Amino acid sequence: DTDGSATSRLMLSRPMSTDDRPPWDVWLVHGPADRHTLVYRTDHTFQDGMGAAYTARALLGDHPEGAPAPQRPARPTAHGLADALGEVVAAFRAPTPKPAFDGESTGRVDVCHADTPLARLRAIARAHGGTVTDVYLAALSHAVRTWYLKDTGSAHPPLPVSIPMSVRAPGEEYAPGNRMVTARLLLPCDEESPQRALARVVARTGRLRES
């Protein structure tokens, strides 16, 4: 394991404790060449992803005060409420085709990742009026497109995903529980241009934040 993938698979496949211990744990995983990985895990009923990120940074980070500030809640707009209602209606429609993922599950858990400087992601996000999350979603869209195109010779249709959106208010950074909602988004896997894919993601997530 030279890139952390085996550690990730181990942590994803190992269940949380069900006894009287707290619903979180910290693991020190020994790797090759005297390398180590420190892993903080928490049960989702106890803490959501943003809460876990704040806690891990406070416990393990060199600069715990450098965590991103929570976004201040915005007032709902008529356009945003209409979009939210549209999402509810869409949930009752026929499932969106997703041929790359409609096959039988093998049950195997795997992790694929690429290391990219955060400064680069932030620069791309600023240049396109989006966020780092938008850049990640656009990159995921392009990865699915490339993978499916290589295997089948055809483009994958837009892929429905559910994305978490934090609703933590200032002062709730370390609060337990789940302070998040999920929103439905169609990843533009049919878009050949990464720039246009990012523009479509930015437009869609912008409407979601308004709602």
Image: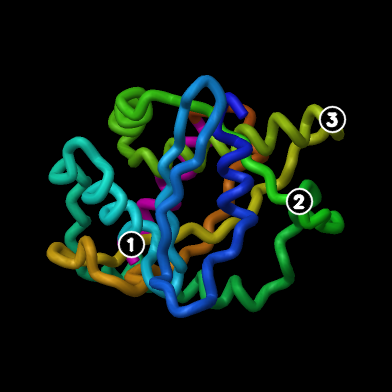
In percent of width and height, residue 139 lies at 53, 34
Q: Real-space Cα distance between discs 2 and 1? A: 29 Å
Q: Position of residue 27 (x, y in %)?
A: 45, 49
Estimate how packed mark 3 is, as few (under 14), some (14 to 19) or many (20 or more) residues with alpha carbons within 10 Å.
few
Q: Secondary structure at mark 2?
A: loop
The amino acid type, in three-letter code, at marker 3 is: Gly
The region drawn magenta spans 196-211
Looking at the rendered image, the disc whose residue lies closer to the viewer, 2 or 1, is 2
**Residue drawn 33% across the image and 70% down it:** 179
On screen, residue 203 versus residue 77, left or right, reads right
Reply above or below: 10 against 145.
below
Q: In this orientation, does residue 54 appear? A: yes
Kind of residue at disc 1: Ser
- Whole-Å distance between the Cαs marked 3 and 2? 26 Å
Location of mark 2 (residue) = 108
Residue 128 magenta-highlighted: no
Q: Which residue, given by chain and number where applicable, does mark 1 sit on?
A: 166
Q: Residues within 10 Å of mark 1 (few under 14, many from 20)?
A: some
Number of marks in the rendered image: 3
- The nearer-to-camera label among 3 and 2 is 2
In the rendered image, the quadrant that contains the C terminus is: bottom left
Contact flag, marks 1 and 3 (Cβ < 8 Å): no
Q: Amino acid at mark 2?
A: Arg
